[in-house]
Amino acid sequence: MPPDEGFRSAAVFIHGVALTLNYRTEEGLERLVEAERLARALDVPIVQADSLAWRGVLAMAVGDHPAGQQLIIRARQVILDHRLERLTSAAHSVTATALVQALRHDAEARTTLATARRLTAQADDIAPWFEVCGRLIQARAATALDEASLAKQLIIEAQARMTPDLIGTLAQELLDEAEAALARLRADGVYTPTLTAAEMRVLQFLPSHLQLPQIGEHLFVTQNTVKTHVSSIHRKLGVTSRAQAVERARELGLLEAPAYD
């Protein structure tokens, strides 16, 4: 790539992720630092935030919580400074932020976690490593918030997305740790709506004027499948109409609020 090509920073970031997933930690961290430097130089703030966030997650994974939280807070600030919080590509940084807030019992933690889930559902089929690791980080946040049912749902979704090349990597370790954390959580953890990934995808269309058959066309599923998901969404959110589902989902952070100029 040319030296001024913005995708160069993204390539270096993914290289760093691949190295750290395979326990080549020192090399991987060097690449992540380089990715952040390139992202700042080439004005690619999303990669800058992602590099900081993943380094933060790695630090917390080895018990260095102060350093990890500081890196993740820096990542969040980059997202806020550049108003990237609505972008699907912000899912990784928002997920890391949810973990920090949950561990601190921050009042915003549940809303941030719901936003991370929404963005992650939109990001499916983009980054297989994040489809697994992102959900497992979210599961750890859920257990920190005593959300047992949500943590279990996220772990199930992560297990379903584990690919052969992720077996034996840091992703497997994150899965084992998430399962252990869930096992330690008391059985009467607080309940929040645990929509599946498929239900989350349908939910994103409910604020639109699309009818169920049209939603099915967008998602490449049948009208009956969409109808089943909508019924489940209503039940889990405790509502009886599409408008109520949208309102309740926005309250929970599962849908973003409408943007106003």
Image: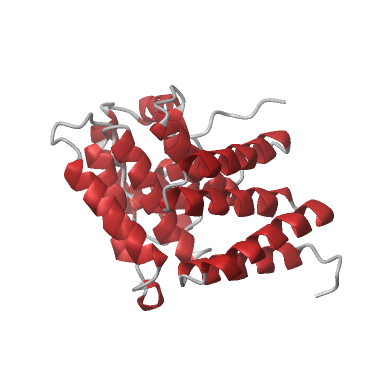
Quarter of the N terminus within the rendering = bottom right
Question: In the figure, 50 relative to 238: above or below?
Answer: below
Between 90 and 19, the one nearer to me in the picture:
19
Q: In screen coordinates, is 217 left or right of 143? A: right
Q: Residue 128: where, in percent of width, then height? A: 46, 66
> Is residue 207 something that shows in the picture?
yes
Determine the residue located farthest toward the left in the rendered image.
187
Between 210 and 60, the one nearer to me in the picture:
60
The residue at 42%/48% (across/down) is: 63
Colouring scheme, one of rainbow, by chain, secondary structure, one colour: secondary structure
The residue at 43%/37% (across/down) is: 113
Between 181 and 120, the one nearer to me in the picture:
181
Determine the residue located farthest toward the bottom in the rendered image.
164
The residue at 56%/53% (across/down) is: 55
Q: Quadrant of residue 211?
A: top left
Numbered-mark total: 0
Q: Quadrant of residue 17?
A: bottom right
Quarter of the C terminus within the rendering = top right
Q: Residue 226: where, in percent of width, then height? A: 33, 50
Q: In screen coordinates, is 200 left or right of 49? A: left
Q: In screen coordinates, is 205 left or right of 48? A: left
Determine the residue located farthest toward the top in the rendered image.
107
Q: Residue 115: where, in percent of width, then height? A: 48, 38
Question: In the figure, 253 relative to 33: above or below?
Answer: above
The residue at 67%/25% (across/down) is: 260
Q: Residue 153: where, in percent of width, then height? A: 27, 48
Q: Quadrant of residue 257?
A: top right
